[in-house]
Every structure is written in C-alpha cells, then in structure tokens.
Amino acid sequence: MTEKNWVSVSIPGDLIEEIDQLLKAHRKWASRAEFIRESIRRQIEQIKSKEAESA
C-alpha cells in the first residue's frame, strides 16, 4: 500500500458556510473533505481538458 502525503489548507469561513449549505441540501457528499476532494478533482480535469483542446 502506498503512503499518502497529506497537506492542510485554510478555507475562509464564508466558503465553508456555502459548502455546508450544499452538503445539507444535496446529501450527495458524506463530508466537507469528500466535497472538497471531488471539487478539486473536477477542476483539475477541466483544466487538463482545456489544455488538451488547445494543444
């Protein structure tokens, strides 16, 4: 099993409040961490896709 390297990030309180509202409204994600991981992955995919289109 590979060892994971973890880092912490600070997120402004107003953004956390928006995330919490989404979590309550949609019940798709089990936690803030899951929502944030998925959001970052989607952003990375979008950037890579745009880069591939312009290459």
Image (cartoon, grey):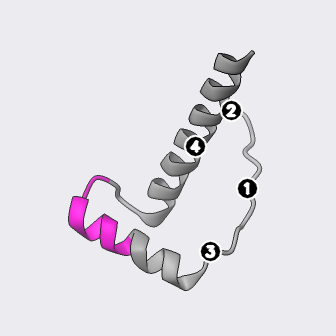
Tell me which numbered mark, 4 or 1, is placed earlier along the sequence. Answer: 1
Read off the magenta span: 20-28
Q: Secondary structure at mark 3?
A: loop
Q: Are marks 3 and 2 in contact (CB under 8 Å)?
A: no
* Residue 19 belongs to magenta span: no
The three-letter amino acid code for the residue at tag 3 is Ile
Q: Which residue is mark 2?
A: 1
Question: In the image, is residue 24 part of the stretch drawn in magenta?
Answer: yes
Label 3 to label 1, Cα distance in Å?
Answer: 16 Å
Image x and y of residue 26, in percent:
23, 59
Q: CA distance from mark 3 to mark 2?
A: 30 Å
Mark 4 or mark 3, earlier in chain: 3
Badge 4 is on which residue? Answer: 43
Kindly report which numbered mark, 2 or 4, lies closer to the viewer in this rendering. Answer: 4
Disc 2 versus disc 1: nearer the observer: 1
Q: Residue at x 41, y 63 (%)?
A: 31
Nearest-to-viewer mark from 4 and 1 = 4
First reached walking from the N terminus: tag 2 or tag 4 = 2
Residue 2: which quarter of the image? top right
Q: For marks 3 and 1, give the one nearer the viewer.
A: 3
Mark before the other along the chain sequence, 2 or 1 = 2
Local packing at callout 1 (Cα closer than 10 Å; few below 14, some 14-19, many 20+) is few
Instruction: Name the residue at 32% across, 73% down.
Output: 21
- Cα separation, mark 2 vs mark 4, equals 27 Å
Residue kind at label 2, given as amino acid type: Met
Q: Residue at x 28, y 52 (%)?
A: 28
Q: Is residue 9 above or below residue 38?
A: below
Comparing labels 4 and 3, the label whose residue is closer to the camera = 4
Q: Name the amino acid, label 1.
A: Trp
Q: Secondary structure at mark 2?
A: loop
